[in-house]
Amino acid sequence: MTGVDERDKKIDELNKTIEMLKFSQNQLAQAEKLKIIDEFAHGLSHEVKNPLAIILQGVDYLSTKVNKDDPSVTSTIGYMKDAIKRADKVIGDFLNFSSISALELEPADLSAVMDNSLVLVRHQLETHRIEVVKEYQPGLPLVKLDQDKITQVLVNLVLNAIQSMPEGGKIIIRSTLEQGQPIRVKLEIEDTGQGMAADDLARAFDFFFTTKRSKGNIGLGLSTVKTILDMHGGEIKLENKESEGVKVTIILNAGQ
Amino acid sequence: MAKRTILIIDDEVSFAEMVKLNLEDTEDYEVRTEYKGADGVKTALEFDPDLILLDIMLPDKDGFDVLKDLKENEKTKAIPIIMLTALKSDPVKFKAATLYAEEFMVKPVTVKMLVEKIEEVLDRRIVEKMKRDEPKN
């Protein structure tokens, strides 16, 4: 090896080390920010859940004392209970988001993590008559990831796909090796649903953006997904397919 | 049938009183309330309830410390305890507490959910006692 080759090799190694340090620094900064949000969320949760608990007990008590033959009374009680449930769900979603404070990375087979995630949504898949087609490339390298958090990501994405197909449909899941360096694994999740409006696609990862607010959704699902993937140094892309439905692409770095 | 006796230890006075009202309204329970941990332990010793509903965040001492005090005291250790809390955090503490508490419930809870859980815990306790008392072959 010539002196020039030797120097280039060292520069290359140095660049890799700098990249790794930048990634670790970014992770630490993210973790610190999320820790503060987590503490805030738990304080807020305590302060909101207690009044909700009092209101719910109060509504339950009053519902035993009023004339239930009057339909407007029973529907009013129902609306009040639904509102309490919705407010509680908002707090729950916020707590879920805020709990992404640190990653526990370990090498894992991304296709196997996908399979485990599908087990968790098996009931919803059956209820909504969704067929799952898996096209996993064999022999893919392991990916360094936090299994619980990536499972949270995949469950979230599959649930979104299910919700976009109220009349049933198909989810195609494909894992492949992404071309180029560093070595990366790509996972695509496609549905045959109605697709997304261009404006919604552009804002899908924004905090508190949702098209399902009336159903009690506060719009932290996809921003949580993006935050988790950012912390892994990964990527996510959302696009409408030419024919029908949405394709989500996730790319994660391979590594032991 | 004799009424079941319940002790609620919760610093949210309105919540504790609402739960007391709802449980007593069923006419199946006699309920006492305490708003501080130390008072809760004292009343548990005097009242000897069938079950305790215990909050985690208390003004004078942590609910987990109250739980430990009750479970380490010969006179109160057999009383089943349901941790009723607005907090869902700190899995380590929760794990540690599962060694002691019979159940966890996260607020808000309906009266129906609460009564079902109380009855489930009390029934479980009766079955366990019957098994213990069975003559050994």
Image (cartoon, rainbow, N blue to C red):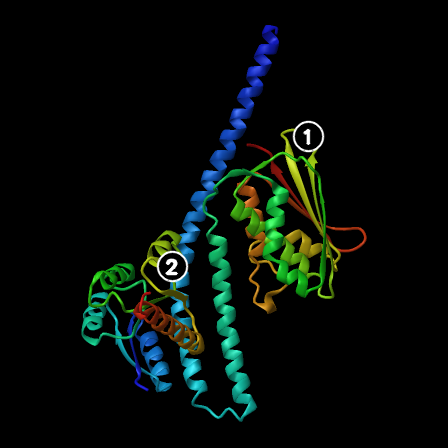
Residue A148 relative to residue A62: left or right: right
Numbered badge on residue A28: none
Q: Sort mark 1 into few (<14), some (14-19) or many (20+) by Cα contacts within 10 Å.
A: few
Residue at 60% in and 51% down: A117
State the count of labels.
2
Numbered badge on residue A43: 2
Q: Sort mark 2 into few (<14), some (14-19) or many (20+) by Cα contacts within 10 Å.
A: few
Residue A136 relative to residue B76: left or right: right
Residue A211 occupies quadrant: bottom right
Q: Circle 1 — which element?
A: loop
- Identify the residue position indicated by label 1 in the image: A180
Disc number lying in front (2 or 1):
1
Q: Circle 2 — which element?
A: helix
State how far apart marks 2 and 1 are (Cα).
45 Å
Q: What type is the residue that disc 2 sits on?
A: Gly
Residue at 38% in and 61% down: B87
Residue A98 relative to residue A215: left or right: left
Q: Which of B21/B77 is in front?
A: B77
